[in-house]
Image (cartoon, coloured by chain):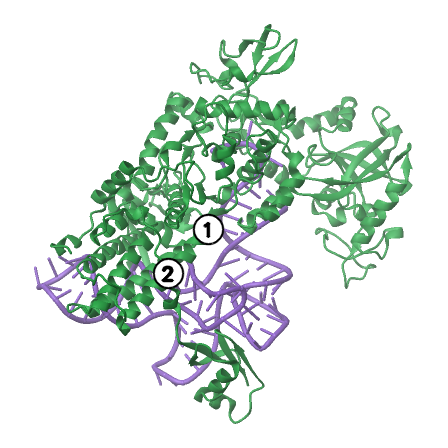
Amino acid sequence: MTADPSKYDRYNAREAEARWQRAWDAKGIFATRNDDPRPKYYVLEMFPYPSGRIHMGHVRNYTMGDVVARFKRAMGNAVLHPMGWDAFGMPAENAAIDRKVHPKEWTYANIASMKKQLQSMGLSLDWAREVATCDPSYYKHQQKMFLDFVKAGLVERKKSKVNWDPVDNTVLANEQVIDGRGWRSGALVEQRELIQWFFKISDYSEDLLNALDGLERWPDKVRLMQKNWIGKSEGLLVRFMLDQATTPNKESELEIFTTRPDTLFGAKFMALAPDHPLAQAAAAKNPKLAAFIEQCRHMGTSQQEIDTADKLGFDTGIRAVHPFDPSWTLPVYVANFILMDYGTGAIFGCPAHDQRDLDFVNKYGLGNTPVVCPPNQDPATFVITDVAYDGDGRMINSRFLDGMTIDEAREEVAKRLERSTAGNRAVAQRQINYRLRDWGISRQRYWGCPIPIVHCDKCGVVPVPAKDLPVTLPEDVSFDRPGNPLDHHPSWKHVACPQCAGPARRETDTMDTFVDSSWYFTRFTDPWNTEAPTTPSAANEWLPVDQYIGGIEHAILHLLYSRFFTRAMRKTGHVGLDEPFAGLFTQGMVVHETYRSKSGDWVEPASVKVETAGDVRSATLIASGEPVEIGSIEKMSKSKKNTIDPDDIIADYGADTARWFMLSDSPPERDVIWSEEGVKGASRFVQRLWRMVGEIAQVTAPAERPADFGPAALAVRKAAHRALNNVSEDIDKLRFNRCIAHIYDFANALSDAIGEVETATAPDMAWALREAGDILVRLFHPMMPHLAEECWAALGHKTLVATEAWPVLETALLVENTLTLPVQINGKKRADVTVPRDAGKEEIEAAVLALDAVIKALDGKSPKKVIVVPQRIVNVVA
RNA sequence: GCCCCUGUGGCGGAAUUGGUAGACGCGCCUGACUCAAAAUCAGGUUCCGCAAGGAGUGCUGGUUCGAGUCCGGCCAGGGGCACCA
């Protein structure tokens, strides 16, 4: 076939990859038409934030998606595989502050360079559908949907807390609070209440929870995390009467929510959130309490900080009456760990059975009474000191509940309190509570989607009319002072009220960037529609996304918000479905060794040489030969300098090598360790495949398929079809590392066969080798598309392998006539037995009992039991 | 602190989901080719032992004819925690 075999000596990735990328581009084979009649398949990777350069995490993510896209195309699907940019967010503003570059300019420059990098990877993306969320042509539609959501009752304004920097007078993100201080000013952060915009995601708590069951192609762990995040709990709202002699303004009752009414007889105190109305009222008359509440405000708003802060309380002097005993009163505290957002912002504390309550009483000397006794414990001697007991057991010290189980006691308390009344109302009512809070979307920042609202003194909150959309960001802004540039802008916010035409102010808050990413996958289905966010027919045709791939770090927020947003879009007529992602895959991170010089500085891998002597690895600086300490393996990060630039790898080895290594080394859901040796191994395999295909290209096969195949040719065919079967199955399940192991297996078998035939090739073998070559190239095409094109052309094909169909499996070639089963004696492997494939249990048992090893082990006795697991194993119990 | 996940040779991992532990790759060792090196090719490589054999999947206890896999208790590492994306 080829005149010059030496051309197979070395594959030139750099030259070939650019050439094939141009060939795909020229034919536009990855552009997807909405009127394609074939069965649809939508594969999507989480779109990147345009930070400046792609990193190895992107390479991994987009390679996986590309393998799926190319495979599904070969399987005959119309594949939608788009790409865009999650382009709003804080880093652009930080760049503006640090480097005096406008966020827009910075972002679009980053998009341009990252797009080039992605294109050098050979991804089969439909770039005609590219969107950037910071573009008015995108956020215009988001503003329209915001207004639709307002009309549909899905939006509200309410107070919520933010981190406030009292020096810079600005709101801080949790990320900008370092050890309780503002990251630029260093000032101690305070909590401050602002009126903010919210999406009412909590209206969908039950639905978002129930629908998790239907997401069968999501990882169980993600469904579980979302379930716990939504946090449904069934409990009791209980009204505690207050001793009015002790309350600030004759308040007569306090309502609490509890999921443990069974422990009511173990109650030792009540606790209020610092911003609870009763706490506020008491503080108005008690300066010390006011000071305590003020102290509670000097804390960030993150859950982690609240949970790990010292548990502090302040006794208000108010006494609450136990609902089952008018003579029993409990002290009412204000406590820094009670949240106003959950339940009623007030609890009763049962220290014996809740660790946090126990820590609290131990600090304030309130004591505890155990009311649940663990099984096998004597109630008379069961005491709690430092560790609360939250397990199962029987009720003790609880009057009429004694002896009941927790569930019985919970039911009994609920029943009794529902029936008893105070002021003509039941003392208690059952309530289902959710931990999930409404989604606060207001951000006091410039680089985000403006909220299309006008505030008018006369008319109040007025939506911007749809015809006036988009509300665009002003470009002439400055970042010389802290705070929101939209608010500082001299003219932008001053507008006429759309209703009364009087003087009014624009809303200067922008939307959370999670809003942008909650519907981009829908926009991809028809990004050309300038009139509406979606073309429902197109959206409903393509959605749901069949396979969504991204980092596990998005398991809760992004995915939950997207699920809510899709429901809201359905309610407002933009789509016809609830669940946006039918299949979800969460990939692991890319990690790398860290290196430190003698002086303790981090050193980047590119300037380190690692050597191995026996089992010991050591590292030195390439420049000076100075020894370097090899540190732990961590997520690639700029701060530890353990990053590898994808550009360097692609320049040195080619995109295919990078793609292959990314997929080969670890299961995709786990972290992968980037290693120089691993990449070199992948690179060697690229060359080996090229040489192997070169040899096959020189074999001349008969035009007609031979009627019979000799044993050697049959072995080649079996290896090819076994690999085809295995790879197909594993790509479908996204087990790429196993796919690659199967391809290595196949390649090893094929080089053995080639090595044996050498010169005089029989027609049956020649045909089998040609078939194997064609299968091999199509099998590795999804992972290494450029090399595959080069090989496909070398094998004499005039088509692009990227548009070829997947090989057709001959299942008859997978069947073996005999089968070798391991034989265990008492659970330890002692022998093998080879039997016909369809041998019955009796036949197998007879063959096993005739084995020397078995006869020896039984020593003349008959076995107690013989367990024959068909197709698997035989175990003889002696 | 709360929720979720992970732990197997020198290393990354495989194990038909309760049935031969270590596929495949990396590294290392031996040999061939070479003046030499690289590349390539052939063979070997869980540990202990000359061998027969024995041990072995973070630790620990259990269920089972049989456990890397299931259950209980620990230990270590990682992700998320609502304004990073």
Q: Chain of mark 1?
A: A
Of residues A744 and A295, which is closer to you in this image? Answer: A744
Q: Chain of mark 2?
A: A
Of residues A264 and A268, which is closer to you in this image? Answer: A264
Residue A809 circle label? 2
Numbered label tally: 2
Identify the amino acid type marked 1: Glu
Left or right position of A274 against A95: right
- Mark 2 lies on a secondary structure that is loop
Q: Is residue A436 visible?
A: no
- Camera-nearest label, 2 or 1: 2
Left or right position of A704 against A522: left
**Co-location on one chain, circles 2 and 1:** yes
Outermost residue on the top side: it is A502
**Colour chain B appears in:** purple
Q: Residue at x 53, y 37 (%)?
A: A558
**Colour chain A appears in:** green
Q: Residue at x 51, y 34 (%)?
A: A537
Of residues A232 and A340, which is closer to you in this image? Answer: A232
If the image is split into quadrants, where does the C terminus of chain A sit? bottom right
CA gap, disc 2 to disc 1?
A: 28 Å
Q: Which residue is mark 1?
A: A669
